[in-house]
Image: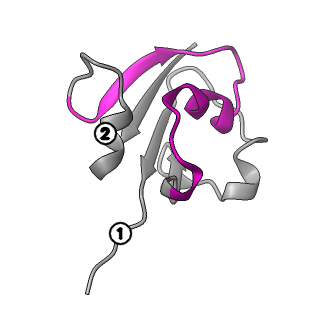
Amino acid sequence: MRVTVKLYATLGDYLPPGSKGNKVEIEAAEAAAVDTVLRPFSLPPKLTHLVLVNGVFIPPEARAATCLKDGDTLAVWPPIAGG
């Protein structure tokens, strides 16, 4: 199945070379879990603060059990500091 992975802010550095903008389309196994799809990107867990599948928040404890479908978009943001 095809899944779009979008990595925002500094997480864009973890995208493979040749990626366009902040996203890449990947081939994943049918019904692959969020954690499984993100594993090859080697994202530090402390930087995967906000994870969305098609705009719906996936809490950390649900990422291993939330399965993706063909055409889904997986978006990840790091924690944002401000003041």
Residue found at the far left of this picture: 21
Residue 81 seen in this snapshot: yes
Q: Quadrant of residue 70?
A: top right
Q: In this view, does 60 lie above or below 82?
A: above
Q: What residue type is labelled 2?
A: Gly
Seen at 33% across and 75% down, the residue is 81
Seen at 55% across and 58% down, the residue is 46
Q: In which quarter of the image is the N terminus?
A: top right
Secondary structure at badge 1 equals loop
Secondary structure at badge 2 equals helix
Which comes before the other along the chain, label 1 or label 2?
A: 2
Query: In this rendering, would 13 be left or right of 44?
Result: left
Seen at 67% across and 14% down, the residue is 29
Residue placed most toward the observer, 4 or 81: 81
Pinpoint residue 12: horizontal percent, then vertical percent: 31, 39
Q: Mark 2 points at which residue?
A: 12
Pinpoint residue 2: horizontal percent, then vertical percent: 51, 15
Seen at 49% across and 43% down, the residue is 54
Q: Is residue 62 above or below residue 64?
A: below
Q: In which quarter of the image is the C terminus?
A: bottom left
Q: How crowded is mark 2: few (under 14 residues within 10 Å), some or many (20 or more)?
A: some
Q: What stretch is highlighted in magenta?
A: 21-46
Q: How crowded is mark 1: few (under 14 residues within 10 Å), some or many (20 or more)?
A: few
- Residue 66 is marked as none
Asked if the stretch drawn in magenta spans residue 34, the answer is yes
Q: Name the residue under label 1.
A: 80
